[in-house]
Image (tube, helix red, strand yellow):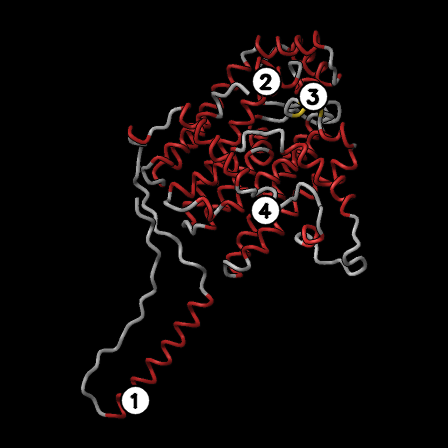
Amino acid sequence: MSKPENLIVKLLKCPAVSLPATVIAGVGLGILFERQRAKKQLQTTAEPKTTIESNHGELPAEFVVSNKELAQIMLELTQLLGDRKSLEAIIPRAFTEEKELRNVCDNLEYTNNANDLHGLTKALSEPIWDLLDRGGKRWRPILGMFIAQAYGRSIDEVLEACSLVEIVHNGSLLIDDIEDQSQVRRDKPCVHLIYGADIAINAGCFMYYAPMLSLLKSYEKKFSKEKILRILRVYSEEMVNIHLGQGWDIYWHNCDKIAHIPTETQYLQMTAHKTGVLARMAARLTCEIIDLPEIVQKKFATFCEKIGVAFQIHDDILNIVGDEYVATKGYYGEDIFEGKMTLMVIHSLNNSSAEDQARLLDILKMKTKEQTLIDEAIAILKKNGSIDYARSKEEALIQEAWDGIKNYIPNNRYKGCLKALAEFFVARKV
């Protein structure tokens, strides 16, 4: 598969003809002026965007990727992230030398080479890598890699940006676990339970900012200021969005304080910001870096947002009925204990008897860990068909997402990977 051709700016050349000297001189000056003007225009114009067809249609059978193939590809890309030490390049496993600190901080006027590196290792590196080393699906950076490869571009071109998204995601988990009073994350006690809430909050916030600083330092040598500004804007917009989504989520799961039960559309908007936002960030950053047209960037943003929402709905379903999920958490219904307004809860509250509605709200307000009460709440959700409704909604979102982007992706193996990844979100067991 050949790489997309770059747009080439062609300057008109004046043919050699027999003319009086004054005319030739005048034409020569005109050409010189025009070339200078064109050169100046090129210097101030944004990078040309790759031309993309929009009629690729359904994925041909030869490019369909099975779940088994997808799992192997994702494993290889996850190993690539580790082998390239792309995450370590942003956040060291330990601050052992002064240069590692200087990678993230230029203002060391008072201490020079006498900084407490051990303290930073204990306060930042250890809690951060405790979480990162527990694994995770790493699907957000892989999503960005698939997009780049679908357009014939190299993983190396987007690896730094994709790594940034993975670190930011894990930083949000550190903060989210404190806000939700969670106990378990990836088969182990949450980071704040091991190192303390103060350490975890500071480390989580560090994971929001250190990756972008690292990216900017690298991209200053590669891209124009205009392109860097666009990349920074994408990052800033999505970081604001994730806090909007988290704000709604936190407010709603304080059931005794909210003024009304959120609607389904409000839930979808919250989840688009809370969960869909980092998938959208991965897509938007990738699209900017490889110069895809604005229309394609918008299509991918919508695609990734929808599959992110479907991912969250499926997470909520697994939280109350997934056997494998329970094995990692130790019990069913963590969302019930946290009082969360999931899609299933909202559907049940709007489609149940007054008695069931009141009882479900009472249990959510209790923030109880008593399994019999959690099971009672789950029984209400099942009785009102809310789990089945959530399943149908997540499947519809995946289909909508794919229908909106399929015509803009060239038909190749990586288009198949993108489709398989989206479908995996609602088929997974954990």
Question: At which x and y percent is residue 116?
Answer: 79, 48
Badge 3 density bin: few <14, some 14–19, many ≥20, Cα 10 Å: many
Q: Position of residue 203 (x, y in %)?
A: 72, 40
Q: Amino acid at mark 1?
A: Ala
Q: Which residue is mark 2?
A: 325
Instruction: Give the residue pinned by disc 3.
Output: 339
Question: Disc 3 or 1, which lies upstream in sequence?
Answer: 1
Q: CA distance from mark 1 to mark 2?
A: 80 Å
Type of amino acid under label 4: Glu
Residue holding disc 1:
25
Contact between marks 1 and 4 (CB within 8 A): the answer is no
Q: Residues within 10 Å of mark 4 (few under 14, many from 20)?
A: few
Callout 2: SS: helix
Which numbered disc flags the more N-terminal residue, 2 or 3? 2
Q: How many marks?
A: 4
Residue beneath the point at 38% across and 80% down: 33
The kind of residue on which mark 2 rests is: Tyr
Q: What residue is at 75 percent from the left and 23 percent from the top? A: 256
Q: Quadrant of the N terminus?
A: top left
